[in-house]
Image (cartoon, helix red, strand yellow):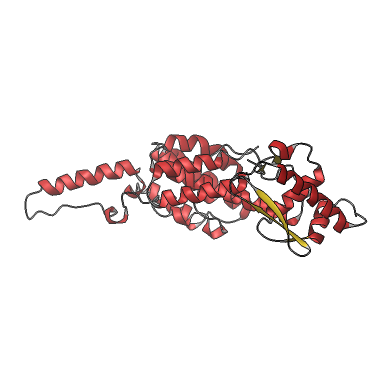
Amino acid sequence: MLLTILGPIQFHGELGCGVGGREMALMTELLVHSGEPVPIAHLADEVWADHAVDNPVHAVQTLISRLRCRLSALPHSAESATITTHGRAYLLSVSDLAVDSLRFEHLLRRARASSNAGDLPSAAHYYEQALALWHGPALATASTESRCIQAERVRLEEVRLAAIEEFAEVRLRRGDAQGVVSELAPIVERHPFREGLQGLLMLALHHSGRTAEALARYQRTRAVFVDELGIDPGPGLRALHEQMLNADPRLAPAASRAEAELTQSAAARSAPSGIPVVRTPHRALIRSRTPLPKPYGAFGRRRGVRPGPLAPEPE
C-alpha cells in the first residue's frame, strides 16, 4: 500500500525514503481532499501554519514537484497516484488500493452488500479485513491540524465505530455471542454514550445466557446518561430493556427461533384436522435472515449515529 493514515501516517516503499515533514503534510492535505482541486493558498496556509513563508506559491510548487518525482519513480501498478494542476490548485487522484482509508471504505461497501444479500460469511470476512487495517487513531502523526484534517479524523472514527457495530451484528446473526461480548466490552467502556454498541453488548450477553448481566448493564448505562447528560437513554435502548424484562421471544438467537419454527411446523402437520395451532405472535415479523429484531435499528438515531460497526480499539 502506498500510503497509510489509519494510525501513524506512513509512506511506503520508495516513496517513503527521505520524505520530509512538509512533504508529508502536503500529501496528507491533498489526500483528505482527494478527487477535488485544493487551492495553493489553502495548502500553503496548512503546511506552513507554524510560520509564514516569503513566497507561498513557489514553496508549494517546490513540494509538489518533489512529490511528483517520487510518485513517477514508482513502478506502475494498481496502487497508483498522480497530482495534476487545475489553475491555481492541485488535485490528487489515487486508487482505492493505494491508501488504507480508501481500501477500508471499499471493503466496507462489499461487507454491507454481502450482509444485505444474506451472505453472512462473506460479510464477516470483509468486515474483518476492513477493521484489520486500523493501527491507531486516524492521522495520528499529522504534522498539521487543519480543520479539514480534524474533520477527516472525526469522520473516519465514526465510520470505524459504525463498522464495529455492523460486524458485531453479523457475528450475532451467525451465533458468535460470546465472541461479541469479549470484544465489545472494552470498546463500550470507551464509548459509553454510543447506544448502538450498548444495545449490541446487551443482546450478546442475552444470547450468551447472561440476561441478568445485560439488564444490569442497562441500569449502569442509564445512570451514566442521567448523571452526565441529564437524560435517559433513547427509545430504542429502553425498548430493548423492556423486551428483555418481558422475555420477548423475538430476542432469541436466530438458531433458537429457527428451531422453534420447525417445532411449530411439525405440530401443525401432526395436529388433528379442525384443531387450530397457536403460533408465536412474532413469527411473521422474523424472516430467516433478518437483521437483529427491533428496536436495534433505533439505537443511537436520536443522536445522529448510524445503527450498525469488531477490531482492536486503537490505542
Task: Kindly give the residue lying farthest to the left in the view shown.
Answer: 273
Q: Which of 248 and 135 is in front in this view?
A: 135
**Residue 15 percent location from the top left of the image:** 72, 40
> In the shown orientation, is residue 251 left or right of residue 162?
left
> In the shown orientation, is residue 178 left or right of residue 261?
right
Placement of 139 over or under 307, stated as above or below: above
**Residue 296 percent location from the top left of the image:** 44, 52
Screen quadrant of the N terminus: top right
Screen quadrant of the C terminus: top right
Residue at the image point whose x is 31% and y is 52% from the top: 287
**Residue 27 percent location from the top left of the image:** 74, 49
Q: Which of 204 and 8 is in front in this view?
A: 8
Residue at the image point whose x is 30% and y is 41% from the top: 256
Q: How many marks?
A: 0
Quarter-of-image position of residue 44: bottom right
Quarter-of-image position of residue 176: top left
Placement of 306 over or under 177, stated as above or below: below
Q: Which of 259 and 133 is in front in this view?
A: 133
Q: Is residue 75 visible?
A: yes
> In the shown orientation, is residue 172 left or right of residue 137?
left
**Residue 46 percent location from the top left of the image:** 80, 54
Task: Kindly give the residue lying farthest to the right in the view shown.
Answer: 54
Q: Can residue 193 be seen in this view?
A: no
